[in-house]
Every structure is written in structure tokens, then in C-alpha cells.
Image: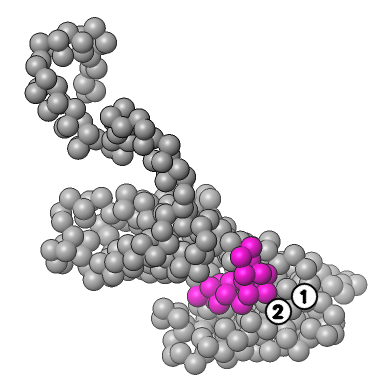
Amino acid sequence: MTARRLSRDEFHAKLAGMDRGDLVKVLWTLYWRGAAPVRERIEGLLEPQHSPAREKARQEPPDAGATLAAVTEFAALARSGAYLGRDRRVSPKERTRWRMTFRSLATASQQALLGDDVATAARAVSTLVDLACETKDMDYFRSEDPMEAARFVVSDMVGLMWARLRDTRGARDMVQLAVTDLVRWEQPHGWTRVGSGWVAKRETTLAGVLAGLLTVPDLWERAAHRYLEALDRTATRAGGRQGRSRRDLAADLAGWNTLLVERLTGPEHEDLLVRASTHAAFSGPELAFFQAQVARQRGDLPEARALVRKSLRSLPGHPLFRDFAKALDRPGTVAPPL
């Protein structure tokens, strides 16, 4: 049951019987234990001459270095199990408040991206996104679905980071960094455990986010070259990044692979697509489907049919595989839509 608020008259009547010491005690309790907006309002009343400076400070982005340090410490504590009570560095009260801490750090990182030190702010964002990816399978917090609880939309945060890198370092440098991030972080079904809820409704694929930033054909070609380099680095690490198998990596990046086939048309790009679709970092039915799309684009329909049927033998119910195979089997088909 919600406690009833005092009316204005009741409030004044109670204060009327208090001496100055009691009033100061009430005000101090409100100031010390109150939320930040309450403290700021009291400070503004006590020191009105400093209000313009405080307002200017609130509007300025937070210090990127301090934000990175706070994010790094938080991530280290989470990975050590401190928020599960495995050591005393995090108090019992703070363990239950991890959502608010995560949201506060995410907000600070996002605001820091708008400042001058974008590179440092991007490192803070990257640390949070790494942590978000890990929480899909690892228990760092007492939560059934950590990113849903934290209201952290990975695709929105990454999209802002890439856009700021483009604005400050240029599109070419952004592409190189973004493609590496894509291979590292892409999760086509989102970053929540359940896949439904407030966060899941707002998520989109990183492939789609990056595609929106590649506004000219030259950037797509550059992205393809950087993609091959990122795959080379992944293939040299046993089991892929974060323990992903070659089959899982092919599935996670299937949407991006399809976009490459759609955008890199013409014989001048055939070598890039062949290298990507035969890369050692991939395996499984999604790899065969990637190869089927490349074969279809170069006009080798018998090879495309054989490859998509190979994919369907592994995943017979896959709707995209099935629709692609049906389109290839239509009489007169030359280039069915992907």
C-alpha cells in the first residue's frame, strides 16, 4: 500500500514546531540520502551563484578516461564472480544494484562518445559489449536474462560508436574497425538469453547496422577485404572467438555474407566472394548456402542447386534454404532474389 503524502498545509504545520537544528537535520537527510536531482536542486537553492557552472558541467560529456576506468573495473569484477558473492569487493547491496550500475556506465560511455576522446570512449563501449556477449552464456549476475534486465541494446550502442568513428576518423578507418567488431560480436538472434522482451524488440543485426553506414560501392569493397583479414585472424585461433565453432561462426555471419553477395556484383568482385565463401573459418550448412549464393550469382545454377540441397540435408526445415531452392527450380530462373 502506497504511503499517503502530506498536504502542503500539513507539511507546513509539522515544520512550524521545529527549531533550526531540527530543520537542518531534515534537510541534511534529504540531501545526503536523496537522489542526484534532489541534491542538485538543494545545491542550487543554497548556492545560486554556482548554478550556471553546474548546468554547464552537466551538459558536458563525461571524461572518457574516467569512464573507461570505471567500465574496466566493473567488467573485471563481474568476470571474477564478485557480483555473485564470491569475494568481498562488491557489497551485498551493490550486488543487487548491478543493473543500475551497468545502465549508468552504459549511459556514461554513450555520452563520452560525443566528446573529443572518441577512441577512449569506444574502448569503454567495446568492453561493455564484450561483457554483454559473454552474459548470454556466462553467469556474472543473478539474473535469468542480464541484458534484458540492464536494458542494454547492443546494436544501438555499437551503431552510435561506429557512426562517431566515421565522423571523427573517416569512413575508411571506421570500416576497418567495424568489420572486426562485426566478426567478434554479431549475434543474429540478439544478445538477450530469451530473445523476447523490451530489449529484443529494439535489437537489430550488426550486419544491418553496418550496411546502413556503407553508402558507396567502394566502402563495400573495402569492407570485404577487411572482412577476409578478420576471418584470417579468427581462423588462426582454435575454436574461433569466445569458443565459437566454425559452424557457429558461419551461422552468425550468414546475414552479412548474404549482403556481400547482393552488393558485390560483377566479375571484378568474384575473387573476393570466392575467397570469403571458401574460407577456413567457416563450415556447415550456412557455408554451403553462402557458396550456393555465390554460384547463383556467377550463373552456375546446377552448382547452386547442388549446394543448397546439401544445406537442406543438414537443416531440412530452414526457410531461407527452402525458398532459395524452390526459386532455383522454377522454369526459366536465372537470378532468383535472395
Residue at mark 2 to residue at mark 1: CA–CA distance: 6 Å
Q: Is residue 296 above or below residue 132?
A: below
Disc 2 marks which amino acid? Arg
Count residues near mark 1 (Cα–Cα under 10 Å), then give few for <14, some for 14-19, many for 20+.
Answer: few
Residue 222: give its label: 2
The picture quadrant where one finds residue 318 is bottom right
Disc 1 marks which amino acid? Asp
Residue depicted at x 20% and y 37%: 33
Horizontal and vertical percent for residue 310?
A: 65, 82
Q: Is residue 38 above or below residue 123?
A: above
Q: Main secondary structure of the magenta part?
A: helix
The picture quadrant where one finds residue 126 is bottom left
Residue depicted at x 51% and y 57%: 115
- Secondary structure under badge 2? helix
Residue depicted at x 10% and y 11%: 17
Horizontal and vertical percent for residue 326?
A: 76, 69
> Is 108 positioned to the left or the right of 27 in the image?
right
Residue depicted at x 45% and y 43%: 56
Residue 182: give its label: none
Q: From the image, which quarter does the C terminus lie in?
A: bottom right
Q: Is residue 51 visible?
A: yes
Horizontal and vertical percent for residue 212?
A: 68, 61
> Is 61 positioned to the left or the right of 324 in the image?
left
- Secondary structure under badge 1? helix
Residue 183 located within the stretch drawn in magenta: yes
> Is 180 positioned to the left or the right of 68 in the image?
right
Q: Which residues are magenta?
A: 166-184
Horizontal and vertical percent for residue 10?
A: 20, 9
The picture quadrant where one finds residue 216 is bottom right
Residue labelled with disc 1: 218
- Is the Cβ of the residue at disc 2 closer than 8 Å to that at disc 1? yes
Residue 169 located within the stretch drawn in magenta: yes
